[in-house]
Amino acid sequence: MPVVFRYKGFRFFFYSNEGSPREPVHVHARGEGGEAKFWLRPAVRVGTSDGLDARTLRELAGVVEQNLELIERTWHEHFG
């Protein structure tokens, strides 16, 4: 489970087994309050969430947007 970066107690990561066939590029964020999955394209959006309020999801989506290139680069380096 490669961790891409951390922000305010949240780990942004993806699972090494992302489905077969592999799902499109996305990132998971997990913190003490819960977890969310963010799709990156065509625009950053919440895919699923559990335990996180709307304000936190908006903040995390903004963090994903700011780190979009890093997330995509790390994804492609890991999966090839």
Image (cartoon, helix red, strand yellow):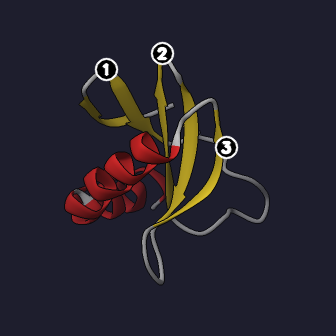
| Mark 1 element type | loop
Residue most extreme to the bottom: 42
Q: Which amino acid type corresponds to the residue marked 3 in the rendered image?
A: Asn
Which of discs 3 and 2 lies nearer the camera? The answer is 2
Residue bearing mark 1: 9
**What residue lies at 27% left-to-right and 30% top-to-bottom?**
6
Q: Is residue 6 above or below residue 61?
A: above
Residue bearing mark 2: 32
**What residue lies at 53% left-to-right and 38% top-to-bottom?**
53
Sequence-earlier tag: 1 or 3: 1
Q: Which amino acid type corresponds to the residue marked 1 in the rendered image?
A: Gly
Q: Which amino acid type corresponds to the residue marked 2 in the rendered image?
A: Glu
Tell me the quadrant of the picture where the C terminus can be found.
Answer: bottom left
Give how far across and how far down residue 21 sits, in percent: 77, 65
C-beta proximity under 8 Å, tags 2 and 1: yes
| Mark 2 element type | loop
Q: Answer left or right for 43 relative to 49.
A: left
Q: Is residue 12 above or below residue 48?
A: above
Q: Answer left or right for 29 relative to 16.
A: left
Q: Is residue 26 above or below residue 18?
A: below
Q: Answer left or right for 18 relative to 62.
A: right
Q: Is residue 28 above or below residue 76?
A: above
Residue bearing mark 3: 17
Give how far across and how far down residue 62 sits, in percent: 29, 57
Give how far across and how far down residue 61 sits, in percent: 38, 56
Q: CA distance from mark 2 to mark 1?
A: 7 Å
Q: CA distance from mark 3 to mark 2?
A: 23 Å
C-beta proximity under 8 Å, tags 1 and 3: no
Q: In which quadrant of the rendered view does residue 10 lie?
A: top left
For disc 1, the neighbor class at 10 Å (few under 14, some 14 to 19, many from 20) is few
For disc 3, the neighbor class at 10 Å (few under 14, some 14 to 19, many from 20) is few
**What residue lies at 51% left-to-right and 21% top-to-bottom?**
33
